[in-house]
Image (cartoon, helix red, strand yellow):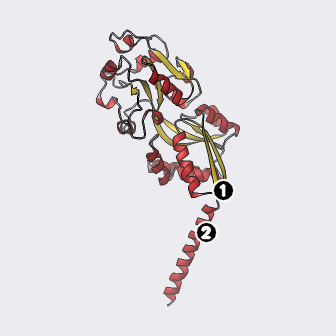
Amino acid sequence: MKKIIMSLLVTSFLLGLSNISLAQEEELEGTVTLSGAWAIYPTAVAWAEAFQKAHPKVKIDVSAGGAGKGAADAIAGLVDIGMVSREPDPAEIKKGVVPVYILHDAVYPVISDKNPALPDLLKKGIKRQTWLEIYVTGFITTWDDAVGAKVGKPIHLYTRSDSCGAAQSWAAYLGKKQEDLKGIGVYGDPGLLEAAKRDPVGIGYSNFSYVFTREGTVVQGARLVPIDSNENDIADADEIYETRENAVKAIRAGRYPATRKNYFFVKGKPAGLVKEFINFILSDEGARIVDEVGTSLSLPKEERTKILMSLRAE
């Protein structure tokens, strides 16, 4: 009888703790504001919707505008979280930013599917030095010089006009900074992608988030230019990405060179509702949402656990 009573008491106690925990979760309320990287925006919106559904008294406001805006807004205290699709700058850390690694993805050179150099590009790809001469030094201004074949067309070069992670990451692949990139400035990922798609002799670059459809194919009207990473003058099969699945495999295997980390910038140590939201996005459910949205790559569980432990230890 004593054992039965004790068992009932323990069960009641555990249920009580559970109910307290649930009550605490239900009592979460307030607003969290985010701004910044276009690359992170689709996933952040999905995270926000799921978190708000679990906590009806919470409102999550998410707006895009580029990584530069996200970083500046977080530093100025205009938002709770800045979405930044590049590495943090030491100067930003000195201003009190705590970067939280949340996702990873890549940046891809994009052209129109009507580009006359497309057959040669799919055969040869483009080496890093050639990219430098197109985007940085300006030595290469025609598709003839880019692919080493007679095309008879100039290159119309496009870049980002706003401070952003895509431009920073593409420049970093070339060993440079965003301000070193040449080209006609276009605002935002959607704008730059559209400019490259609609110009038969144009070229731009865009985030993983925007170059693939929800079905996993490259967006209509665009093609991804192969990067000849091993410099064998051949666009090898594992350097040509026509589906998101192939691109993900290359990123995870470390074969694709223009990859990057994505961050949440928080001014000071994450606390309160902001901390609860970060805990959620780095949970198994948060990772599932990333994979479901399909515009970025989730972090491995061990990596997410490590990040959460580091935040708790601060």
Which SS class for mark 1?
loop
Q: Position of residue 158 (x, y in %)?
A: 50, 20
Q: Is residue 101 left or right of residue 269?
A: left
Q: Position of residue 192 (x, y in %)?
A: 51, 26
Question: Looking at the image, can residue 191 be seen?
Answer: yes
Question: Looking at the image, can residue 299 be seen?
Answer: no
Q: Quadrant of residue 225?
A: top left
Mark found first going from the N terminus, 2 or 1: 2
Return the residue at label 2: 20
* Relative to 46, residue 173 above or below: above
Q: Amino acid at mark 2?
A: Ile
Q: Position of residue 197 (x, y in %)?
A: 45, 24
Separation of disc 2 and disc 1 at Cα? 16 Å
* Relative to 240, residue 271 above or below: below
Return the residue at label 1: 29
Q: Is residue 221 left or right of residue 27?
A: left
Nearer the camera: disc 2 or disc 1: 1
* Relative to 272, residue 151 above or below: above
Query: Which residue is painted at 35% across and 11% down in the image?
Result: 151
